[in-house]
Image (cartoon, rainbow, N blue to C red):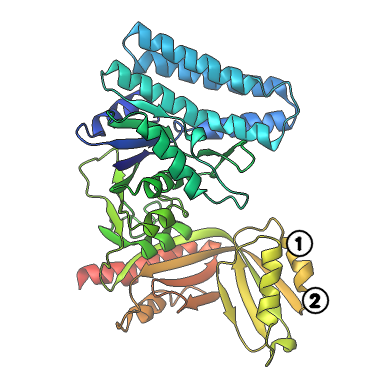
Amino acid sequence: MKIMKFGGTSVGSAERMGAVSQLLPTQEPVIVVLSAMSGTTNHLVQIGQQLAQQDQAQAERLTSQLEDRYKQVITELYKQDASKHKAKQVIDTTFQDIRACFGTPFTPASEKIILAQGELLSTQLFQIYQEEQGTPSVLLPALEFMRITEEEEPDQAYIREKLLQQLAQYPDNQLFITQGYICRNAQGQIDNLKRGGSDYSASIIGAALRAQEIQIWTDIDGMHNNDPRIVKDTYPIAELSFDEAAELAYFGAKILHPSSILPAQQFKIPVRLLNTMQPAATGTLISSKKSGNSIKAVAAKDGITAIKIKSSRMLLAYGFLRSVFEVFERFKTPIDMITTSEVAVSLTIDNDTHLSAITDALQRFGSVEIDTDLSIICVVGDFMEDKPGDALRVMQSLKDIPLRMISYGGSKNNISLLVNTSQKNNALLAINEGVFQERRLS
């Protein structure tokens, strides 16, 4: 069994849906995981925002705009009247469900229901298209098997049990279609895996079924060695280890959801990143295979806040760091980077929701300094294994960039550097020149 996930741009129009259909294998079982058509989730977010502000007139205007877009998709995607009629029924039902949220108090549960409609639409329309093409297929409702726990983690045992039960009902079918992103929570309410969660859905499904391979199809030919929006001469990386890919995804590589590696890694299921616009391109293969001692790529993560706690009580004290970490645990705020000296600890976070409360709690340990508008530059590879010089090349390339913090040694796959966001582009260009260009010329 293969899992093939297609993102929003891959199914962003009638033409793209037709192209995706051509990529599906005909002689082996496959589960196709679809995102909402591009732009849909953002549009649904705007509808929810208007309802939260009690502006039903604006919410209705936005809803009608989206409904008209999907009616146009129907005319472009299908040739047969029967298919158009089925698709129109799907659209009518979906937008009735959206409008059902208009006359009731708007709650987080209402918002989750509205946000789920994008994936419900794309999968149903795609399945009707398969019928019109004469390709037998089965729609597997994700809301009947995808569930998260109270801790918002995938309930793997439940997912595997329910998914296998559904598949057992269709022993002769090869093509299954399901929704990415959406799920139910521990209370049985409609929920989601957060933005970009369709990658995560594909990996969870692949792990549950012990799949042969998980394919993530996007609009770029694999994971690049640098940010192609900033650096011109980037190139796709042929192979990455699970650890390398996880570091890059977490620290800003947009092609992959940060959580999507772990389920696949747990069962050593290869993940292949491919391009629907250039399906013949090799892409990137992520696996448990070690892929050589070298620097592979660099990624950047914006929106970073640095917190420095300075206190003479740290000197020769035990338990100090534990007490500091407990503050972040209490406010459920992950730490990205950390460095320490004899009398100070500096760390970074990417979620400042509870920053004020965290600052207040930390002040009992000493003076607290807050710095914002920062970015983490993450250099990734397998470069710490008996190979000197790589860290030096990175630092030398950044000799003209002020570095706020350096984290090295916590992982053999990662050097993390903190810079002002205003210096991020310069840092990425400098690393490209000093590390990747130099290596290609040597």
The residue under the point 52% across, 34% down is: 143
Q: In the rendered image, which residue does mark 2 sit on? A: 364
Q: Percent from the top left, x then y, of residue 251?
A: 47, 61
Which type of secondary structure does the marked residue at label 1 adopt?
A: helix
Q: Percent from the top left, x then y, of residue 374?
A: 58, 64
State the image quarter where residue 126 is shown: top left
Q: Of circles 1 and 2, which is in front?
A: 2
Q: In the rendered image, which residue does mark 1 sit on? A: 356
Left-right relation of 224 to 404: left
Q: Amino acid at mark 1?
A: Ser
Which type of secondary structure does the marked residue at label 2 adopt?
A: loop
State the image quarter where residue 29 is shown: top left
The residue under the point 49% across, 28% down is: 120
Q: Amino acid at mark 2?
A: Arg
Q: Nearer the viewer, residue 145 or 63?
A: 145
Q: Is residue 41 above or below residue 383?
A: above
